[in-house]
Image: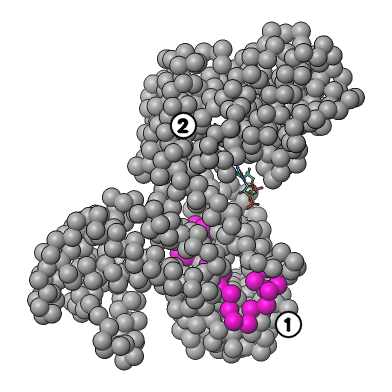
Amino acid sequence: MSASRFSDTISAALTNGILVVTIDNAPVNALSADVRAGLMAAFGHAENDGNVAGVVLTGAGNSFIGGADIKEFGKPPVEPFLPDVIARIEAFPKPVVAAINGAALGGGLEVALACHRRLAAPAAKLGLPEVKLGIVPGAGGTQRLPRLTGIAAAIDMIANGRIVSTAEALKLGIIDAAASGELIAEAVADAKAAIASPIRRTGSLTVQPEAPEAVDKAAADALRKARGQRAPAEAVRLIRLAATASLSDGLAEERRTFVELRDSEEAAALRHVFFAERAAGKVEGLDAVTPRRIETVGIVGTGLMGSGIAVSALNGGYRVIGVEQTTEAAEKGRERITSLLDKAVQSGRLDAAGRDDRLSRLTVTAEMQELAKADMVIEAVFDDLSVKTELFQRLDDIVRADAILATNTSYLDPDTIAASTRLPERVVGLHFFSPANIMRLLEVVNCKETAPDVLATALVFAKRLGKLPIVSGVTEGFIGNRIFSAYRREAEYMLEDGALPQEIDAALEAFGFPMGPFAVFDMAGLEIAWARRKRQAATRDPNERYVVIADRLCEAGRFGQKSGRGWYAYPDGKRTVDPAVTAMIEAARAEKGITPRHFPADEIVARLLKAMAGEGEALLSEGIAARASDIDLVMINGYGFPSSKGGPMFAAGRR
Ligand code: 3H9
């Protein structure tokens, strides 16, 4: 065996006549300029060296290749370009086997598709998730994948950015075999066996005919989910092209589309979101801290929120002890949790064995004392300060001294709750969003006294739940509700100045929100915010501008969708403009002597973005949020801000 190096990131070793080329570009073996150049050099060597009968291509570490280097997007392109590297591999005169040791994503799968044979480790993941970055595959993915899988399956994977397992990739015909033992040894043997046979190049295959209805259905499903984003529609168009165009024409059209999308605002926004997600939850200095060990999670309160949190914790592999005040309430809580798991089975998110496994780790009881076994207790009881402080004082006497206490409050001051306990350093906020078993966002509230290892533990816990943790300091409503309040305030000012709810909602929905603010208020119900406003009335600054319209609605019994009427009427459940609301708005304007004016959609969006970004700046300067991108993620994942616009901080900076 002799080893050689072709660039900083590409090395190779000759094994049994087969050159094993390894990409080592931590963390995910992305296809940087050095990798591309090294691959060109390695294949040049392999072609000319008579001792090399074939090539095996693999990645070091946990990834095969994580894709093009996203950090290079937006910078001047450097040769050799990926499509040229891929063309070189596909045309290579000796057999090339991809030994897919881990993630083969985006450009990584495109490289593998150009190899002549593909073997994957059982735990590998394969996919073309480019649409999630606002682009289409740009190095042959839309043309080569359908040649292996057919058009419908390729649309399902590419237009949805769906990643598949080795087992599914085998079924779909993407790989030739799953490795059963030592991947590289099997790939070398496979390459040797291939020497005597004609090379099968993916690009030379023709797309197999299939039922047009299946293709149309796959396309319609993907486009429905795409919510107006460009990349999925373009991906569908390009994949369909693979059935009729030559490889070179298909590749040229794919490349043209890729470059156009790569340079779009939508792609810039989604790249921002990608890196924002990787930065989220990182706290300076916390790397050096050892998190506490959590195996059993107690949850006090198994209502709507508590049962969702319980399901999340069960999904994360924890043992869960739910606590209620009475045996009957405990039984109801257990039923609620079971029914959430059943729903997950019905929708295909979980199988029956997974459900049973989760139930085997669940206890729901009226015995608070059971929490002595918990490593962490999350309270999800009524959002009232005295209820929560009394509960934490009781827990002080029950749980172990090293157990963590977490509050799920959304508006109360967790520092006050912590101060009521003997060990405030073990208190942290975990602000789940409803439904807690579905929503990815989790605001982790770092209280004044929270110990670093408690914060570190909360972050590990959040990640094990599959959540996106964003650290927030203590402030009324934390990051999300503070920004949402500013958004709401500005929307109400515009309402008073002349815009109607349906105009504001339409402008925001055209911008990409699934629902405008007034439709959201109606869905959430108006009475909780009304009660809060009444509580705050005594301390409100009399000089502050106050819009009474929402109060008037509540006084008239219009509490939103639940009561059949709110900012809109809901005959047959359908959102409908109600002239009675328009009249109430006009009356409120007249009382203040306001002459209404027209607000164009653009101005509505600009004002709301400015209000959100302004509040975001305040959160940053107060040290509540660590970075602007955290604020963007909160609004995208908790409040429906369109990810294709990058979040309020990003969007405001682009205007
Ligand atoms: C593409 O391929 C276009 C082509 O079709 C056409 C080209 C012509 N580039 O996620 P992690 C960084 S588009 C640069 O926490 P994991 C990431 O920022 C690409 N950097 O790890 C983080 O850095 P840091 C299509 C990347 O183990 C670190 O790696 N590919 C890239 O949980 C660890 O990331 C994709 O969309 C990249 N491509 O998961 C796949 N990928 O430590 C995107 C990651 O400084 N990547 N980084 O914060 C992933 O899905 C996951 O990273 C992966 C590993 C599953 C690979």
Quadrant holding the C terminus: bottom left
Q: Residues within 10 Å of mark 1 (few under 14, many from 20)?
A: few
Q: Is mark 2 within 8 Å of ligand 1?
A: yes
Which residue is at 87% across, 19% downward?
16
Residue 294 falls in image quadrant: bottom right
Q: Position of residue 134 (x, y in %)?
A: 45, 41
| Residue 561 among magenta residues | no
Q: Residues within 10 Å of mark 2 (few under 14, many from 20)?
A: many
Q: Residue furthest right?
A: 1
Numbered disc 2: secondary structure: helix
Q: Quadrant of ligand 1?
A: top right
User: Which is more toward the observer, 613 or 540?
Assistant: 613
Return the disc, 2 or 1, that comes first in the chain's sequence.
2
Q: Residue beneath label 2, please?
A: 258
| Residue 456 among magenta residues | yes
Which residue is at 58% across, 32% downward?
78
Residue 523 falls in image quadrant: bottom left
Identify the disc placed on residue 401: 1
User: Which is more toward the observer, 207 or 114?
Assistant: 114
Numbered disc 1: secondary structure: loop
Tell me the magenta residue range.
Answer: 433-457
Q: CA distance from mark 2 to mark 1?
A: 56 Å
The image shows residue 487, relative to residue 111, as above or below, that is: below
Which residue is at 62% across, 54% downward?
356
Q: Position of residue 541 (x, y in %)?
A: 30, 88
Asked if residue 146 shows in the view, the reply is no
User: Is 325 on the left or on the right of 32, as rendered?
Assistant: left
Asked if residue 651 shows in the view, the reply is yes
